[in-house]
């Protein structure tokens, strides 16, 4: 191997030049438009108060994988995942992997899904949910930063703080409980691929569910 | 408020099927009429089902017929009367929501079509936008009555529908609908129902009558609508796919002489699956609302981009590449093959061949355009035939389980040497060391430089042969896909590759306008031609090095003798030009020298059977070695490579040989094994096949756990990627070791 290295380097150089040309041709237009949340880019930073009244931020979880779950306990699509315990199982499985699960409630006061801290904790207890924290976002600031559209809407941030997944929780856009049978969990898939050091094969999907109830821009 | 809504939803979440009082009355009335004998024999009681009602939606199934006739087609419609402030959804619901669905239970022989969707409205729920309907909406469906239905019979249409109705909050609702329709010799229309359904159908989006085009416009998309007049107002495009555009983004329109054009922001989950009918366009023309079904052609680059999974972040060579051959769809494989083919044109060993062909066109173009075109097509034929032949061999051998993979032709030292000779001759020809125009020597350089019809065909073949070592990253996955598919699919992937490869030259031969863009023939052509000799020599040097790895010093000797003999033969033919008897003698001598050199090459360039070539400072791979190392608690990295694989060499240069990678491997006790496929090796071929690959490079990372499955790393490595993988493996190993 060492003996061939010098000649190899010449040829490798040529090859790299060729590949670089090809890369230039193809790199244009691969980025996504619009929202601040982009796959492969740093996930938007945020600060929000959790159900215990503590100020939390994305940066405190640096070095860990973080899952954001937009939720609204009265939305039928959210109910589908909670009454079947699918969401709680997912939360617990992710916790076992050392992943930080943050449920985000962006409904403003007076809109469906809005809760204060104690009620949020009561809901978790009642449903046996296991998020690491519940973030209260009554001004919808975190939702705007991520461009969350539905409940549920899932985001995965890798340990480097890069957004690795955004979109639906699974591939069955329906409110019916029967749709859970045979549904493919995009979240599990993405987490497994991240763990394996592979790129996420379906990194951006179309989220489904109820609209996130946004607070008017103040 | 929250609590209240919660209870309300709980109460209404289930099925709400209460026939409306008014319908009940209608039934009674109809029954009474029937009893009075005023109704026609066999006439239905109602052309509208019982209603399913909630405080938000009252839904019925409406029929345009009171009685149906055998073999006819007619329409029914699901009618949704929606309370003010609420809406139901179109086929693509927009940012949230869910489309209405109908499941039919029909008697045997009867069939129902798809919902014929009226044009939707954009319904903003700041900052989101949904697509749907307010007020009253009819969703028509065509029903076919079996030809053997008997007059006097009654057929029962049963439909169960689900819909989501939202204001700000959303309620999923469902309803079951039943329509009893008598069969009569002649259909009996329900005029009121028919006219409502007709009015809805008359307003359905109409085929546009033009083909739109969808192109990338930076990060946005440009949808050009050549048939829409510049005076059209309020243009809005509603995509069928929910992953095409950002639904809430404004759609600025520009007018041009060619019609209108919309700028659309891409969806954050952008994916372009089909290019035929992509959605509905609504606009106003002279105050009249119009709706068109938009059929569009998308530029191929857009299709390829959308097939691309997100690339891992931060890399010096960052390219969107498919990582697993097995996960590719046919369309993605075809697109990648096509792109891969195009990129092959840029490879240092191929570019000169093609450029000289193009120069040939430039000279010929002044004489005859038809001939240029003919040559372009012959070149295409040469490319396609050669690719198909190689593909046929690879797929054929794969089918019978033999260990042959992509690039196999470079596993034979005599073939590698033959290629080195061809490269050398092309190089000397480019330098002008010998003229070939008047000679009949059948060397590749002659064929590539000018030649006739055979020449054009052979240029195509030659270009393919010299391109095969440069397996571009795109091709790796596509070729891996090709050999794991049924032969017809596999061949179509190779065909796509061939078409992409031939495209630039064929395009040039058909567009003489492009040739005119070249500066006038002159000295620059000569200089460029000579300059192109050097990449050819470089390629020859590399091939001889490959031969040395394959067959040792004997291989180098054979290669150099072959080059010498070839040079001598060409020179002989050159000097004896035009001289009758001498020519005969020299030709005989040339044939003898060529045969002798060929024999010598076959004798000396013999690969060591079934052994891997020298691997230097790394350990040689074997499946047993991996298992043993894993059992010892060591993570293992395996590099499947070959001396003739340029991508492999590039990876070794830019990633594997970097100091930080070596340090990370050492720190985490990663054992680096090398599987060298420079020569044929059935064990390696089988390991590649197990990972869904037909060729190298392939990089595997095995965890330090007995029997642990390997992770496949991308075909283009970066140092960061390897360091991260090594650290992860090291961490896992330590965790495993600390367990009791």
Image: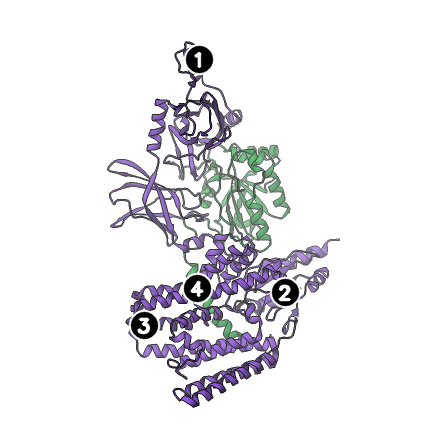
> What whole-number distance in Å separates the C-alpha atoms at marks 4 and 3?
22 Å
Residue A179: give x, y in percent of width and height. 55, 36
Residue A217: give x, y in percent of width and height. 40, 39
> What whole-number distance in Å separates the C-alpha atoms at marks 4 and 1?
75 Å
Q: Are marks 4 and 3 in contact (CB under 8 Å)?
A: no
In front of the other: B305 or B582: B582
Q: The green chain is which one?
A: A
Q: Name the residue under label 2.
A: B684
User: At numbered mark 2, what does the secondary structure look like: helix, strand or loop?
Assistant: helix
Residue B545: give x, y in percent of width and height. 55, 77
- Labels 3 and 2 in the same subunit: yes
Dot in front, 4 or 3: 3
Q: Is B311 located above or below residue B588 in the figure?
A: above
Q: Say which mark, if any, is on residue B577.
A: none
Q: Which of marks 4 and 2 is nearer the N terminus?
A: 4
Q: Say which mark, if any, is on residue B364.
A: 3
Q: Earlier in the sequence, mark 1 or mark 2?
A: 1
Q: Name the residue under label 4.
A: B501
| Left or right relative to B498: residue B645 | right
Residue placed furthest toward the right:
B740
**Residue A30 quadrant:** bottom left
> What whole-number distance in Å separates the C-alpha atoms at marks 1 and 2?
81 Å
In the rendered image, which quarter contains the N terminus of chain A? bottom right
Q: Is B566 located above or below residue B110 in the figure?
A: below
> What whole-number distance in Å separates the C-alpha atoms at marks 4 and 2?
29 Å
Residue B222: give x, y in percent of width and height. 35, 50
Q: The purple chain is which one?
A: B
Q: Which of marks 1 and 3 is nearer the N terminus?
A: 1
> What whole-number distance in Å separates the C-alpha atoms at marks 1 and 3?
88 Å
Q: Name the residue under label 1.
A: B31
Residue placed furthest toward the front:
B581
């Amino acid at each position: 191997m060492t003996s061939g290295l010098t000649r190899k380097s010449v040829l490798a150089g040529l090859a790299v030049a060729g590949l670089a040309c090809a890369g230039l041709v193809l790199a244009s237009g691969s980025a996504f438009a619009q929202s601040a949340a982009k796959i492969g880019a740093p996930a938007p930073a945020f600060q929000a108060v959790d159900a215990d009244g503590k100020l939390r931020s994305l940066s405190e979880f640096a070095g860990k994988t973080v899952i954001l779950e937009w939720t609204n306990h009265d939305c039928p699509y959210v109910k589908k995942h909670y009454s079947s315990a699918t969401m709680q199982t997912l939360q617990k499985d992710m916790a076992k992997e050392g992943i930080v699960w943050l449920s985000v409630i962006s409904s403003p006061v007076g809109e469906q899904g809005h809760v204060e801290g104690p009620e949020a904790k009561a809901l978790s207890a009642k449903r046996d949910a296991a998020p690491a924290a519940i973030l209260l976002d009554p001004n919808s600031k975190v939702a705007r930063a991520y461009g969350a559209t539905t409940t549920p809407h899932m985001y995965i941030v890798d340990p480097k703080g890069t957004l690795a997944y955004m979109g639906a929780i699974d591939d069955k856009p329906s409110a019916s409980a029967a749709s859970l049978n045979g549904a493919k969990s995009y979240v599990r898939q993405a987490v497994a691929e991240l763990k394996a050091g592979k790129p996420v094969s379906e990194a951006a999907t179309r989220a489904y569910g109820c609209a996130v109830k946004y607070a008017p821009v103040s | 408020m929250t609590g209240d809504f919660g209870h309300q939803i709980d109460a209404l979440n289930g099925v709400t099927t209460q026939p409306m009082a008014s319908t009940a009355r209608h039934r009674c009335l109809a029954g009474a009429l029937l009893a009075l004998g005023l109704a026609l024999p066999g006439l239905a009681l109602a052309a509208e089902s019982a209603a399913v009602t909630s405080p938000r939606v009252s839904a019925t199934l409406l029929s345009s017929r009171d009685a149906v006739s055998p073999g006819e087609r007619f329409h029914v419609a699901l009618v949704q009367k929606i309370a003010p402030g609420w809406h139901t959804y179109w086929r693509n619901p927009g940012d949230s929501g869910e489309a209405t669905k109908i499941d039919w239970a029909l008697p045997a022989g009867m069939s129902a079509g798809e919902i014929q969707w009226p044009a939707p409205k954009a319904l903003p729920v700041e900052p989101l936008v949904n697509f749907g309907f307010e007020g009253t909406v009819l969703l028509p469906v065509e029903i076919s009555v079996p030809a053997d239905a008997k007059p006097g019979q009654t057929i029962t249409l049963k439909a169960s529908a689900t819909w989501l109705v939202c204001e700000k909050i959303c309620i999923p609702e469902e309803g079951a609908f039943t329509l009893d329709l008598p069969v009569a010799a002649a259909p009996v229309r329900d005029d009121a129902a028919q006219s409502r359904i007709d009015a809805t159908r008359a307003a359905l989006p109409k085929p546009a009558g033009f083909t739109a085009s969808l192109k990338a416009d930076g990060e946005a998309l440009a949808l050009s609508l050549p048939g829409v007049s510049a005076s059209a107002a309020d243009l809005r495009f509603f995509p069928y796919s929910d992953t095409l555009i950002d639904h809430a983004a404004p759609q600025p329109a520009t007018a041009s002489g060619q019609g209108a054009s919309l700028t659309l922001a891409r969806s954050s989950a952008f994916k372009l699956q089909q290019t035929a009918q992509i959605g509905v366009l609504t606009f106003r023309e002279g105050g009249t609302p119009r709706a068109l079904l938009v059929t569009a052609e998308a530029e191929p680059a857009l299709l390829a981009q959308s097939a691309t999974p997100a690339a891992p972040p931060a890399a010096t060579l960052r390219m969107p590449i498919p990582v697993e051959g097995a996960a590719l769809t046919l369309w993605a494989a075809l697109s990648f093959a096509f792109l891969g083919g195009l990129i092959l044109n840029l490879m240092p060993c191929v570019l000169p061949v093609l450029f000289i062909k193009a120069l040939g066109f430039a000279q010929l173009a002044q004489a005859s355009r038809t001939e240029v075109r003919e040559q372009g097509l012959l070149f295409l034929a040469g490319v396609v035939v050669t690719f198909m032949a190689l593909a046929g061999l690879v797929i054929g051998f794969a089918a019978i389980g033999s260990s042959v993979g992509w690039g196999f032709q470079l596993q034979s030292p005599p073939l590698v040497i033959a290629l080195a000779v061809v490269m050398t001759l092309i190089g000397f020809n480019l330098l002008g060391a010998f003229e070939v125009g008047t000679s009949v020597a059948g060397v590749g350089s002659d064929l590539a430089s000018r030649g006739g019809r055979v020449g054009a065909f052979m240029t195509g073949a030659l270009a393919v042969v010299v391109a095969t070592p440069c397996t571009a990253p795109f091709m790796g996955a596509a070729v891996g896909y090709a050999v794991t598919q049924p032969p017809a699919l596999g061949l179509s992937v190779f065909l796509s590759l061939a078409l992409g490869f031939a495209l630039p030259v064929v395009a040039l031969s058909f567009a003489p306008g492009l040739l005119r863009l070249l500066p006038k023939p002159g000295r620059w052509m000569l200089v460029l031609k000579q300059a192109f000799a050097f990449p050819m020599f470089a390629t020859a040097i590399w091939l001889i090095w490959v031969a040395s790895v394959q067959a040792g010093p004997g291989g180098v000797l054979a290669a150099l003798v072959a080059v010498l003999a070839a040079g001598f033969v060409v020179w002989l033919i050159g000097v004896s030009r035009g001289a009758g008897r001498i020519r005969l003698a020299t030709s005989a001598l040339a044939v003898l020298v060529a045969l002798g050199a060929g024999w010598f090459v076959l004798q000396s360039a013999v690969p060591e059977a079934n052994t891997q070539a020298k691997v230097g400072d790394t350990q040689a791979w074997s499946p047993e070695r991996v298992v043993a190392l894993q059992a010892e608690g060591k993570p293992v990295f395996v590099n499947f490579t070959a001396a003739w694989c340029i991508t492999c060499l590039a990876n070794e240069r830019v990633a594997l040989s970097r100091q930080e990678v070596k340090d990370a491997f050492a720190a985490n006790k990663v054992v680096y094994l090398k599987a060298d496929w420079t020569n044929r090796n059935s064990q390696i071929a089988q390991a590649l096949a197990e990972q869904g690959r037909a060729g190298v490079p392939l990089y595997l990372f095995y965890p330090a756990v007995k029997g642990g499955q390997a992770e496949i790393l991308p075909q283009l490595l970066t140092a960061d990627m390897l360091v991260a993988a090594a650290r992860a493996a090291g961490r896992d190993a330590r965790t495993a070791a600390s367990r009791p």
